[in-house]
């Protein structure tokens, strides 16, 4: 399979290549030095208690090193094949995907599986590369349909990259907003969130300016300025990973807590830990089916893990956690202002009868009597 690109398709990128070849390539050399140093520092502080998220962060840095290397190759001489440009963008997208996986893993405290969402985002870009190349030019009859082949001001490849980055950025922002407030692993929540958002924002700006410049949104006399601005955003997007020295040394400190009862679970089977950490048992609609969908683990495996680590069925395990929570509320004088019905609902029970039955089984008395005894003592 050949990767030779038609001359008309090469012309689509020629204004970028012309700008890239201007001046001595100090920026990519400086970038490679920074990224290599950051990779070394991260690897030197990696251990069994923080590798669940640092491995993804290291893959992010490696992808950026590969992307920067492709950039260096691209500017080394004229008439480089365009597939080098495609690999540059592919590695850049991969770095963002690994960064998202690092953030979600660090916040939740276990290694997140690479979901189909990331494969879809990367596949969207890869497909666009094939569409932009001569691989889909079967005959001259197709030229009318594949109109972008002869249009020097259009490239489905660069647009798809922006769409992919936007998809991953929105997904990461959602993860950050939902999970960062209740994370027990990320201590400096504001600093970490600011760092994450800065990296994503710079990548979005870089890709957006690339598209605007590509489609001649700006006047021709501003081309040099806009292209320089785009390169500045590209430079900042990875230097921001190491721009705050405290972040470099803070990330390895995001680790599994040794005090957690279930910290010895394997990375992809932390069923009980997830239920307890995110307090899923308080959700009135929580069921085996909903947990299976949320964790991407089969219902049978969830039940087996719960029984293996607690000796209880799924229903009894969830109800026992709810009763423990209700006792906390009672100890904090909850029933002085609310009814036992409200207490049961707040702790995840769908019916008052089920709440009272479970409470009696666990404590030998009713919630009201337990509260009265507590007050009298």
Image (spheres, grey):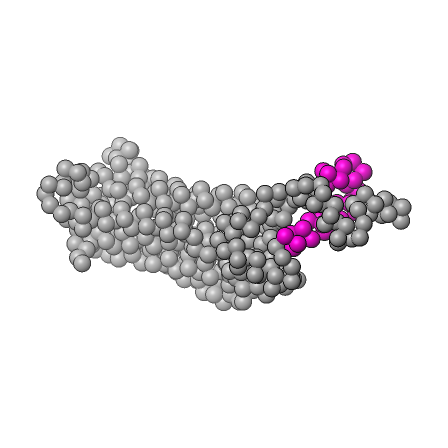
Residue 334 is inside the magenta segment: yes
In this orientation, does residue 338 appear? yes
Q: Is residue 87 above or below residue 46?
A: above
Q: What residue occupies the far right of the structure in this picture?
A: 376
Residue at 54% across, 64% down:
266
Which residue occupies the foreground of this view, 119 or 46? 119
For this rendering, which residue is in front, 127 or 301? Answer: 301
Q: Percent x, y for residue 230?
A: 34, 43
- Tell me: 185 left or right of 62: right
Q: To which quarter of the image does residue 271 belong?
A: bottom right
Residue 32 shown left or right of residue 330 in the figure: left
Residue 260: horizontal and vertical position, in percent?
64, 61
Location of residue 112 in the rendering, given as x and y in whole percent from the top left corner: 49, 56
User: Left or right: where does residue 97 sit relative to residue 46?
Assistant: left
Predominant secondary structure, magenta span:
helix
Q: Quadrant of the N terminus?
A: bottom left
Residue 280 x, y percent position in the rendering: 60, 48
Q: Is residue 298 magenta?
A: no
Residue 197 in sight here: no
- Residue at 74% in and 45% down: 356
Residues in magenta, as a range: 315-343
User: Measured along the vertical axis of the image, is residue 142 above or below residue 111?
Assistant: above
Q: Residue at x 61, y 61 (%)?
A: 307
Q: Is residue 232 left or right of residue 309?
A: left
């Amino acid at each position: 399979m050949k990767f030779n690109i038609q001359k008309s398709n090469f012309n689509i990128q020629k204004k970028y290549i012309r700008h890239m070849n201007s001046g001595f390539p100090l920026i990519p050399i400086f970038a490679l030095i920074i990224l290599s140093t950051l990779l070394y520092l991260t690897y030197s502080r990696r251990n069994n208690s923080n590798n669940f998220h640092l491995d993804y962060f290291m893959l992010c840095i490696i992808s950026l090193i590969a992307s920067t290397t492709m950039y260096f190759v691209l500017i080394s001489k004229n008439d480089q094949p365009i597939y080098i440009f495609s690999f540059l963008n592919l590695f850049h997208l991969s770095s963002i995907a690994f960064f998202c996986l690092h953030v979600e893993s660090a916040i939740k405290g276990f290694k997140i599986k690479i979901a189909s969402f990331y494969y879809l985002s990367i596949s969207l870009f890869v497909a666009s590369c094939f569409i932009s190349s001569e691989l889909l030019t079967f005959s001259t009859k197709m030229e009318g349909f594949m109109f972008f082949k002869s249009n020097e001001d259009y490239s489905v490849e660069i647009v798809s990259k922006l769409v992919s980055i936007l998809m991953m950025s929105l997904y990461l922002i959602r993860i950050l907003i939902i999970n960062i407030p209740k994370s027990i692993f990320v201590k400096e929540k504001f600093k970490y969130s600011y760092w994450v958002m800065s990296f994503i924002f710079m990548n979005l700006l870089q890709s957006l300016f690339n598209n605007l410049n590509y489609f001649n949104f700006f006047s021709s006399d501003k081309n040099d300025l806009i292209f320089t601005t785009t390169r500045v955003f590209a430079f900042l997007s990875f230097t921001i990973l190491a721009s705050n020295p405290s972040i470099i040394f803070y990330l390895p400190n995001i680790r599994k807590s040794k005090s957690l009862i279930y910290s010895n679970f394997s990375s992809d089977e932390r069923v009980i830990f997830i239920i307890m950490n995110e307090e899923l048992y308080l959700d009135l609609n929580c069921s085996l089916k909903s947990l299976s969908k949320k964790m991407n683990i089969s219902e049978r495996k969830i039940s087996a893990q719960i029984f293996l680590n607690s000796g209880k069925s799924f229903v009894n395990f969830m109800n026992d956690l709810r009763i423990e929570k209700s006792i906390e509320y009672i100890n904090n004088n909850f029933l002085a202002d609310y009814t036992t019905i409200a207490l049961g609902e707040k702790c995840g029970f769908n019916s008052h009868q089920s709440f009272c039955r479970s409470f009696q089984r666990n404590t030998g008395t009713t919630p009201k009597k337990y509260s009265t005894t507590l007050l009298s003592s």
